[in-house]
Image (spheres, helix red, strand yellow):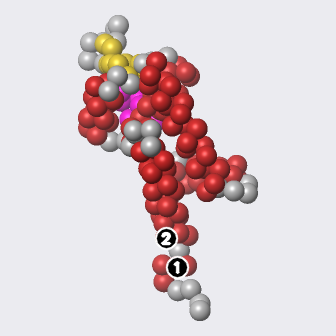
Amino acid sequence: MTETGPMLSPGFWLHHAALAWRAELDARLRAVGLTHTQFMLLATAGWLSHVDGPPTQQQVAEQAGADRMMTSKVVRTLEERGLLTRKGDRTDARIFRLHLTKSGRELTDRATAIARAVDAEFFTGDATALRDRLRRLAERR
């Protein structure tokens, strides 16, 4: 049978591959008590802290590609769970900087290992070339 219509579109298959990847990651993250969004924000806050000190909530939202309002709600939930804290900036009272707690760092490390395992299962072969191509596409936005 000849493929026609959306079956010919790489975008169609990218979308469905992303859905499959996300569903698998969601299922595995659920086992450690995180949603995909919570994981992305925790991991992004941790990475940005490592690179350039405690990030602002807006920096985390931008780096994670997340909506600012949704980020604010999720950050409050993560703070209530004791996984991160929001501390006022020394120079600007309107800015809060995010700090992962010890338990937040430990959970992020476990969740990152889960994400790496899912990536290894989904992206066999030349993962570097695939990552670079996807990055170029994503940077268009």
Residue 62 on the magenta span: yes
The quarter in which the N terminus is drawn is bottom right
Q: Which residue is mark 1?
A: 7
Please provide percent x and percent y for residue 47.
53, 28
Please provide percent x and percent y for residue 112.
55, 37
Q: Which residues are magenta?
A: 56-63
SS category of the residue bearing label 1 = helix
Q: Which residue is mark 2?
A: 12
Please provide percent x and percent y for residue 73.
26, 35
- Above or below for 15 versus 127: below
Query: What amino acid type is highlighted by mark number 1?
Result: Met
Which mark, by number, is residue 17? Answer: none
- Which residue is at 48% across, 47% downward? 28
Of all residues shown, which one is farthest toward the bottom? Answer: 1
In three-dimensional space, the C-alpha distance between marks 2 and 1, rounded to whole angstroms, equals 7 Å
Q: Is residue 11 visible?
A: no
Q: Tell me if label 2 and label 1 are in contact, CB under 8 Å.
A: yes
- Which residue is at 44% across, 25% downward? 104
| Residue toward you, 32 or 123 | 32
Query: What amino acid type is highlighted by mark number 2?
Result: Phe
Residue 109 on the magenta span: no
Q: Main secondary structure of the magenta part?
A: helix
| Residue toward you, 108 or 41 | 108
Residue neighbourhood size for the residue with mark 1, other residues' Cα within 10 Å, grouped as few (<14), some (14–19), many (≥20)? few
